[in-house]
């Protein structure tokens, strides 16, 4: 069931990337996030009361078409509303919240799935059990997130490029402390940023092409290939093995005690155990698996926060995490000490911390007119890589476990080489005019 639901998430990511990217660049960041979270929460709530697995898959797919867009939309929104000096740091902190949400989900799973209750709902022909309550709680959390966005402003950069200068000025007043005496100066600067190409109506397909084509044309083509590949490496290396994390931890704890067994020996000895047809499925998750997941999420949240404090070495941090991840992938099955080998498996996923790092380059490289679309397409490519990676690992890890890890290390090391060609960090200088500096800091 878990595998099928993961495929639903990936399919939703493929289908929704282009339309959401187009929508966010033409209708606004704030509006897109509100729609994606609120509609996603409605479908997530309906999923709670699914009467069959097929119904759950369909509702999950529809819901994920909306909710999966929230993270990439948030990256564009936050990156555009923060200054260049702190942008990378804030995006890494955003990734901290993404990571700590896993901790919260594990904690909720421990508290809720451990409950013992069955409430018959005869009018739906279902029994309301703890897993349904967990799904409902998560849907409510998504709805709360969408509600909070109502109290935020639209990106002033987006407003200005669409010619809505007065609205952008209002945001500058409330969000950046713009004084009335400086309105004329700032208004003249905002007017310069207006995207004149959007003044007249164009057919939808032509508009879509105008938004998409520049991403894959000069001067952005090489940067697009570079950033798409790096995001794919970071996301897939993290997610492919993270999906296997509960299975591997369960197998690791349940494997026979053998001090000389390698990491692959321990996990495959349990994964390949005989399955007897007709047995009742046990949907109870072992406490050790939940606790390990909580520790995993908390550990990476702390590491990610530390990384957010040294964003002046953004490129070096990215290269360093790729190096550690690649080396861990090589060594994980060569060490026969159980605790160290499990720690190395966790460190393989360290590169996932750099997803926010790579995302900050998207905000720096692309202009406002197609920044949201480029980020969404990059996320779509990363999800495609994740799905391919899941299927490759699924089909090879049992029979060719060590070869699977060694082959993946090559993928990570190539990413490290590509990251070395990212532009060097530059020191941001202050413009003598305070508000000019503020305008430039949000990407104008």
Image (cartoon, rainbow, N blue to C red):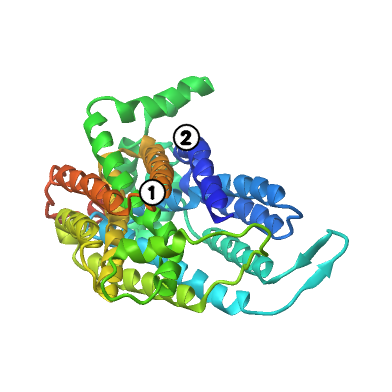
**In what element is the residue under mark 1?**
helix
Residue 97 image offset from top left, x and y in percent: 41, 66
Q: Which residue carries the number 2 mark?
A: 18
Residue 22 image offset from top left, x and y in percent: 47, 35
Q: Is residue 115 above or below residue 208?
A: below
Density class for disc 2 (Cα within 10 Å; few <14, some 14-19, many ≥20) is: some
Residue 19 seen in render: yes
Tell me, yes or no, whether the two marked residues, 1 and 2, touch with CB atoms within 8 Å: no
Q: Residue 265 or 374: which is nearer the viewer?
A: 265
Q: Quadrant of residue 85?
A: bottom left
Residue 90 image offset from top left, x and y in percent: 31, 61
Cα distance, mark 1 to mark 2?
Answer: 28 Å
| Label annotation for residue 393 | 1
Quadrant location, the C terminus: top left
Q: Quadrant of residue 129?
A: bottom right
Residue 132 image offset from top left, x and y in percent: 68, 66
Residue 111 falls left or right of residue 361 = right
Residue 94 falls left or right of residue 14 = left
Q: Residue 383 or 367: which is nearer the viewer?
A: 383
Q: Nearer the viewer, mark 1 or mark 2?
A: 1
Residue 439 seen in render: no
Quadrant location, the N terminus: bottom right
Q: Residue 11 or 20: which is nearer the viewer?
A: 11
Q: Is residue 48 above or below residue 408?
A: below
Q: What residue lies at 44% left-to-right and 65% top-to-bottom? A: 270
**In what element is the residue under mark 2?**
helix
């Amino acid at each position: 069931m878990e595998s099928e639901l993961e495929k639903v998430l990936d399919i939703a990511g493929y289908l929704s990337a282009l339309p959401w990217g187009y929508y966010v660049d033409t209708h606004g960041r704030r509006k897109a996030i509100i729609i994606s979270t609120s509609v996603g929460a409605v479908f997530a709530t309906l999923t709670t009361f699914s009467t069959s697995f097929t119904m759950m898959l369909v509702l999950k797919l529809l819901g994920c078409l909306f909710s999966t867009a929230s993270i990439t939309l948030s990256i564009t929104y936050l990156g555009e509303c923060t200054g260049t000096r702190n942008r990378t740091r804030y995006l890494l902190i955003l990734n901290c919240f993404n990571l700590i949400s896993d901790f919260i989900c594990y904690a909720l799973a421990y508290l809720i799935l451990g409950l013992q209750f069955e409430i018959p709902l005869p009018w739906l022909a279902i029994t309301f059990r703890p897993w349904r309550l967990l799904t409902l709680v998560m849907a409510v959390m998504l709805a709360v997130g969408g509600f909070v966005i109502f109290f935020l402003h639209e990106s002033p950069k987006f407003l200005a490029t669409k010619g809505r200068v007065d609205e952008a000025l209002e945001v500058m007043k409330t969000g950046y402390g713009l004084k009335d005496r400086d309105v004329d100066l700032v208004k003249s600067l905002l007017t310069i940023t207006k995207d004149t190409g959007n003044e007249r109506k164009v057919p939808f397909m032509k508009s879509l092409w105008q938004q998409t084509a520049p991403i894959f044309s000069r001067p952005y083509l090489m940067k697009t290939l570079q950033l798409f590949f790096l995001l794919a490496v970071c996301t897939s290396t993290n997610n492919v093995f993270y999906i296997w994390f509960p299975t591997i931890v369960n197998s690791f704890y349940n494997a026979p005690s053998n001090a000389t067994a390698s990491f692959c020996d321990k996990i495959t000895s349990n994964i390949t155990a005989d399955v007897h047809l007709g047995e009742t499925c046990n949907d109870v998750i072992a406490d050790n698996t939940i606790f390990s997941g909580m520790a995993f999420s908390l550990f990476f949240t702390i590491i990610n926060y530390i990384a957010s404090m040294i964003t002046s070495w953004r490129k070096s941090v990215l290269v360093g995490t790729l190096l550690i991840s690649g080396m861990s992938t090589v060594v994980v099955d060569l060490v026969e000490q159980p605790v160290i080998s499990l720690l190395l498996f966790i460190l393989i996923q360290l590169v996932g911390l750099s997803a926010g790092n790579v995302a900050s380059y998207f905000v720096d490289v692309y202009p406002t007119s197609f920044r949201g679309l480029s980020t969404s397409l990059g996320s779509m490519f990363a999800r495609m890589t994740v799905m391919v990676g899941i299927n490759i690992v699924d089909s090879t890890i049992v029979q060719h476990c060590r070869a699977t890890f060694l082959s993946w290390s090559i993928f990570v090391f190539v990413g490290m080489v590509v990251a070395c060609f990212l532009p060097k960090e530059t020191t941001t200088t202050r413009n003598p005019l305070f508000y000019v500096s503020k305008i430039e800091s949000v990407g104008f």
